[in-house]
Amino acid sequence: MEKCCELCENIDCDYKKVDAYLYTLCDAEKLKKEVAAINKLGFPAEFVEKTPLPFAVKGAVRVKNQAQFNPLKFAFAIAKDLPIYENTRVTELGPNLAVTKNGSIRFKKAIVATHFPFLNKHGGYFLKMYQHRSYILAVKNAAELDGIYVDEAKNGMSFRNYNGHLLIGGGDHRTGKKGGNWEELNRFREKYYADSRVVAKYATQDCMTLDDIAYIGKYSRRTPNLFVATGFNKWGMTSSMIAAMLLTDLVQGKENPYVHVFSPSRCMLRPQLFINIFEALVGILTPTAPRCPHLGCALKYNQAEHSWDCSCHGSRFSERGRLLNNPANADKRMKPKK
């Protein structure tokens, strides 16, 4: 994203250019086709058979001079002069009206950028999205890989260096389901970087769409003055820039050639839709005591993170019921976990 790079060059956000690799453990031919597609679009890419990773790969796509930067420093810099008002929870959105506990706010146009959209009566986001958790270990005394590495497999691992640390990502799973989490990453670390030590660990949660393309545009066909940006599918740093440019045009009534590509009202008939419906039915019909206040699905205890998670739509709560992740929009009374 050229615009993102232009911004980074004038911001203290640890910006630098590195080679990016998309590697595979099983299907080299698939990545060779990826190289051909990237080159056809006018971007230089090449297929390589080896990488600096500590395990053998079948091959990788290498794209040189890709941006790496600290997203928190970047966000702080671009937002520091904006008026930002917090701790005012919107409970309802009407025509040009946002309802809060302490009063209502009138608007001409509004953008819902709440990670998972919270307005259920429009858009059907509770059907066409689910949430996925990913985990990262920050490791000291490990190799300098000098690049960005991502597995083409959905549940693969990713690697990059930052500030003297090796960041190992993976252990992914649908929220509310079991997955590898930090245990999987730690086993990898012990196998390939036996002399290293973990200095930090963290997790993230991403909204996933039916077709792996973000929903950016009008919230629904029935809400002409309400817009949304969601479903970044783990590519938030680039998808947010697309959202900023696209929504800027839409809010101003300008035409944009990518409106239909990212339209939240595009066709929902995808295999993932039926998986989401199945998970929702299972969640609703599972006879457990704790229920999610969002749409009533069963909550499951997450032993790794000591939280109560919803596999239907991804809401999460602490052991005492404090809301951790939406689309639920309030805390839940919870009996302490014994």
Image: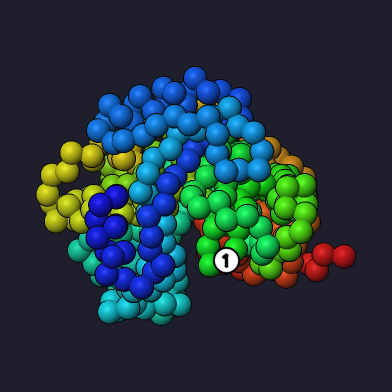
Q: Front-most of 181 and 46?
A: 46
Q: Residue at x 31, y 64 (%)?
A: 8
Q: Residue at x 45, y 57 (%)?
A: 115
Q: Amino acid at mark 1?
A: Gly
Give how far across and how far down residue 149 sits, in percent. Answer: 52, 45
Helix, strand or loop under label 1: loop
Residue 264, placed above or below residue 34: below
Display colour scheme = rainbow
| Mark 1 nearby-residue class (10 Å; few <14, some 14–19, many ≥20) | few
Give how far across and how far down residue 299 sits, in percent. Answer: 70, 52
Residue 162, placed above or below residue 104: above
The quarter of the picture where residue 177 lies is top right
- Residue at mark 1: 164
Q: Residue at x 68, y 62 (%)?
A: 141
Q: Front-most of 271 and 331?
A: 271
Q: Residue at x 61, y 51 (%)?
A: 169
Q: Residue furthest top?
A: 29
In the shown orientation, is residue 69 left or right of residue 222?
right
Residue 154 visible: yes
Image quarter in which the C terminus is found: bottom right
The quarter of the picture where residue 284 lies is top right
